Image: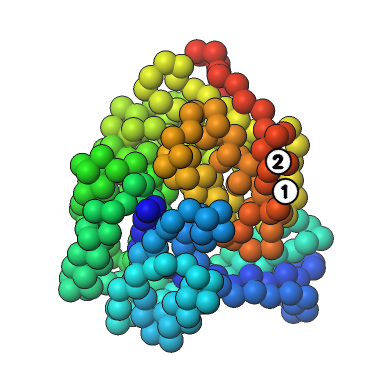
Amino acid sequence: MILTLTPNPAIDETYSAPGVAVDSSHKVVRSHSQAGGKGLNVARVLHSQDFAVHALFPAGGASGRELTAELSAAGIVFTAVPVAGATRRSMAFVDPEADTTTIFNEAGSALDAAEWESLTQAYQGLLERARAVAICGSWPPGTERETMRALIKAAVQREVYTVVDTSGPLLLDAAACGAVLKPNHHELLAATGANSLAEGAADLLERGAAEIYLSAGENGLYHFTGETPLVAHAKLPRKLTGNPTGAGDSAVAALLSSSVASLDRESTLRRAVAWSASTVLMPTAGALSPKHEALLADVTYRILPEGEDI
């Protein structure tokens, strides 16, 4: 079983409207609402590809009930820990003419000590059966950094393949806990203060990160490791247009599925790029385009020579 932990889930609302502009009204041509947050997007992708996955998250209020009802209808196995605060909402406004996506994220509700204890106990119990774990996305307001560190360490110390997708100081903490990291290039540079991707990745590896899979948008995915060869790179030869929301989550799903299937480095990178790219072709996060197998055949892969600028 693959376990996903989404500490701050959301109802993801996507609105498609041409000509999105500030200080004006728009006609929505298509809308969609579903349970979301990075970890739930990961779980949705894995479920669609017939991998056994269990999603864990806190949920509260009417929006929390809406979230769990949608997951039940989708057939995704989950544990929702009841909390007092309402589950947040995330709104994406897609302009198909300009090929832009504008996102507004609510902050979410803080968890009290008893709620954190309930979530931690559920997590510890599920870890006993997990072959891989993803801890993804933002955290509830006021979350103590030690709380996050303890959850990551619990998985790493069990020698469970553990992927963390977060940002800011929490990314540095996750590195120190020995997790596999999946930041994007903006998050890497912001968290480390580095002047290059290679410098930022080296910083995270020195802090203790097991591996780093770095999303670089249309430039594909880099894999950094402390072992030789140090850096591998995979990408599509062309840029895809569409909604990039959730593309990174599909990459995380690919990493987890590749781990449980014991795929090698090249196969893992190729799958991650293909799954991520195929999500761009879909109107909402958590879905792979039927074209993902064809995209896989188009992915290029190479080992970077030592010292090449990144």
Locate residue 303, reporting x and y percent: 55, 19
**CB under 8 Å between callouts 2 and 1?**
yes
For mark 2, give the secondary structure.
Answer: helix
| Amino acid, disc 2 | Leu
Q: Which mark is residue 26?
A: none
| Amino acid, disc 1 | Lys
Q: Is residue 252 left or right of residue 95?
A: left
Q: Is residue 115 left or right of residue 276?
A: left
How far is disc 2 from disc 1 in space, using C-alphas?
6 Å
For mark 1, give the secondary structure.
Answer: loop
Residue displayed at 79% across by 67% down: 19
Residue displayed at 68% across by 75% down: 31
- Residue at the extreme bottom of the image, as rendered: 62
Locate residue 172, reporting x and y percent: 32, 41
Q: Is residue 209 left or right of residue 304?
A: left
- Mark 1, residue position: 291
The C terminus lies in quadrant: top right
Locate residue 85, reporting x and y percent: 33, 80
Residue displayed at 46% across by 39% down: 261
Choose between 42 and 189: the one closer to the eye.
42
Above/below status of 286 relative to 207: below
Locate residue 243, reporting x and y percent: 68, 57
- Rate crowding at label 1 as few (under 14), some (14 to 19) or many (20 or more) other CA atoms within 10 Å: some
Above/below status of 240 relative to 148: above
Residue displayed at 53% across by 71% down: 74
Choose between 81 and 158: the one closer to the eye.
158
Asked whether residue 41 is in view, the answer is no
Choose between 81 and 185: the one closer to the eye.
81
Asked whether residue 103 is in view, the answer is yes
- Mark 2, residue position: 295
